[in-house]
């Protein structure tokens, strides 16, 4: 069971962090192209579906692993630093999902797109830090 949970946890991390890195690379590749808004809107809409579900899977499998093996197994400073960043990332993901829902209901997408250009790289950086802290905690 441990191996299955850990595998699902790692696959969810790969999906979430990989999507984030892909979006940054895609944005850089398309910079200045007249197709950028269309491509990024389409790709971003798909990423916005995968990212939050990856985070939900990470929370479920992470909590399950923690409960199953106890905090003594997973505790330590780096683990708690990682958890703090996971909480921050979860809040940012929830906030961006709320903003994107407003746009789907008809709000002006301009301000949301400008905010996402600033927040997305921050969220990606936090996700990468979470991976680093996980390696420090469990490596």
Image (cartoon, rainbow, N blue to C red):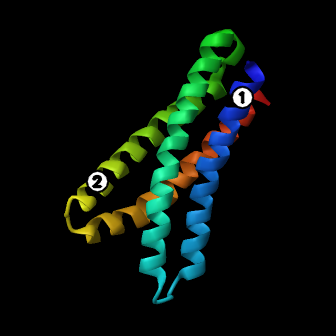
Q: Residue at (43%, 62%) from the top-left corner?
A: 45
Q: Is residue 103 left or right of residue 131?
A: left
Q: Residue at (27%, 60%) from the top-left corner?
A: 104
The 10 Å Cα crowd at callout 1, few under 14, some 14 to 19, many 20 or more, is some
Q: Name the secondary structure under disc 1.
A: helix
Which residue in the protein does label 1 denote?
6
Quarter where residue 60 is shown? top right
The 10 Å Cα crowd at callout 2, few under 14, some 14 to 19, many 20 or more, is few
For residue 59, which numbered disc appears in the image?
none
Quarter where residue 2 is shown? top right
Q: Quadrant of the C terminus?
A: top right
Which residue in the protein does label 2 denote?
101
Q: Residue at (47%, 72%) from the top-left corner?
A: 40
Q: Residue at (58%, 48%) from the top-left corner?
A: 16
Q: Is residue 98 left or right of residue 107?
A: right
Height in image: 27 above or below 77? Answer: below
Whole-percent x and y of residue 32?
A: 50, 87
Height in image: 14 above or below 73? Answer: below
């Amino acid at each position: 069971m441990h191996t299955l949970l850990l595998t699902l946890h790692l696959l969810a991390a790969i999906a979430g962090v990989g999507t984030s890195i892909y979006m940054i690379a895609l944005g850089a590749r398309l910079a200045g192209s007249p197709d950028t808004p269309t491509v990024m809107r389409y790709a971003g809409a798909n990423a916005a579906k995968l990212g939050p579900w990856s985070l939900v899977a990470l929370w479920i499998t992470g909590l399950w692993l923690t409960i199953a093996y106890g905090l003594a197994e997973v505790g330590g400073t780096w683990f708690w630093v990682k958890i703090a960043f996971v909480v921050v990332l979860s809040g940012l993901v929830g906030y961006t999902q709320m903003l994107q829902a407003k746009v789907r209901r008809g709000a002006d997408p301009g301000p949301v797109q400008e905010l996402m250009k600033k927040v997305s790289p921050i969220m990606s950086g936090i996700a990468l830090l979470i991976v680093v802290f996980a390696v420090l905690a469990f490596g």
